[in-house]
Structure formats: C-alpha cells, structure tokens
Amino acid sequence: MKEIFEKNKNIVISVMVVFLVIGIGVLIAFSNTDNNVKPLSTYSKNNEAAPKVVVSEGNFDLGEVPYTLPTDKTITVKNEGESVLQLTDFKTSCGCTSVVLKIPGMEDSPKFEMHNNPTGYVGEIAAGKEAELDIKFDPKAHNITGKVERTVFFNTNDPNKEKITITFKADVREN
C-alpha cells in the first residue's frame, strides 16, 4: 500500500486539494446568506389596510445637463396606506445613475447603482409618512453626450404597485 501511495503521491495530493477547495467554496457560499434580511410583508390587492405607494414623479426631464456637472433630482415617495410601506431591490439602468433613499429619522440607505446593489436593504415608511429618493445622474461616468434616457427601479409591498419604475431624460451638452 505504501508503494502505491508513493507512486501516486502527486495524484493523491491533487485530489485532496481539489476536495479541500470545493469544501471551502461550499462553506463560503452557505455562510454568505444574509439571515438578517427581513421578508416583505404581503397583502391582498383588496386589503384596505395595505400600504399604498405614491411617487411624486414617475417620469421627468432634466433638460440640458452640462457634461462636467453631476445633476441631482429628488423624488418624494409617500405611503398613503394604513400599514408600513417597504421598499427594496433598488437598481438603476446605468452606472452613471445612482439612488439613495432618505427616510426622516433613519440612516440613509446605501447608494444603489447598476452594478452596486447591496442586498438585504429594506426601507420602511410608516403610514401617512414620506421619504425622499435622491437620484444622481453623472454623465462624465461614461463620457456620455447627447440625448439619454435612464431608469431607477425598486420593489414595494404595495399589492397594487409591487414594481416601481422612474424614468428620466437628459440632453447632455459639452461645455
């Protein structure tokens, strides 16, 4: 047996390394699940106690925007329902666009972008209260000029508006 091991020592060690790497990968994959993620509350469409999301502007035009100057727009998100409104899964259509949710009395959300979407964040707006979405458009991030259209997406627990899309246009001008 010792002779067989000595002859195949490199193969045995290689197999052991492969199993070790696979085992570590499995441990990392299962340990990265976020156990603190709060599931969204669910309501039926005809539940009068459900939250009700109202977005001040679903579409807007930033007009002419200088290429060198990031432009901000604040949108109001109000909960006109009777239960807590939950907002999650923020994304943008381009890396030149980011969004931050600001709920009074709470810490601001992380910054969400096309490729930077921290998972597990749930913003909560109490019944009758509102928050602000700070949308930033930075054309210099991708050397963009001319007419563009960008989008911000997020999900809610409002059974009648589970997916929200906010679209804006801009005409980026070189100085």
Image: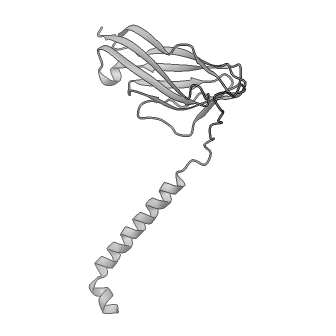
- In x, y percent, where is residue 58? 50, 16
Name, please, the residue furthest toward the left. Answer: 7
Residue 63 against residue 101 in the figure, above or below: above
Q: Residue at x 67, y 19 (%)?
A: 80
Camera-nearest residue between 164 and 133: 164
Name, please, the residue furthest toward the front. Answer: 46
Which image quarter: residue 82?
Answer: top right
Side of 152 relative to 103 (left or right)? left
Q: Which residue is drawn at 52% across and 39% down?
A: 119
Which image quarter: residue 115?
Answer: top left
Side of 158 relative to 140 (left or right)? right
> Colour mode?
one colour
- In x, y percent, where is residue 83? 71, 27
Q: Quadrant of the C terminus?
A: top left
Side of 31 relative to 103 (left or right)? left
Camera-nearest residue between 33 and 162: 162
Residue 90 against residue 18 in the figure, above or below: above
- In x, y percent, where is residue 167? 44, 18
Residue 7 against residue 95 in the figure, above or below: below
Q: Which residue is drawn at 41% across and 31% down?
A: 114
Which image quarter: residue 161?
Answer: top right
Q: Residue at x 50, y 60 (%)?
A: 27
Q: Quadrant of the N terminus?
A: bottom left
* Number of marks: 0
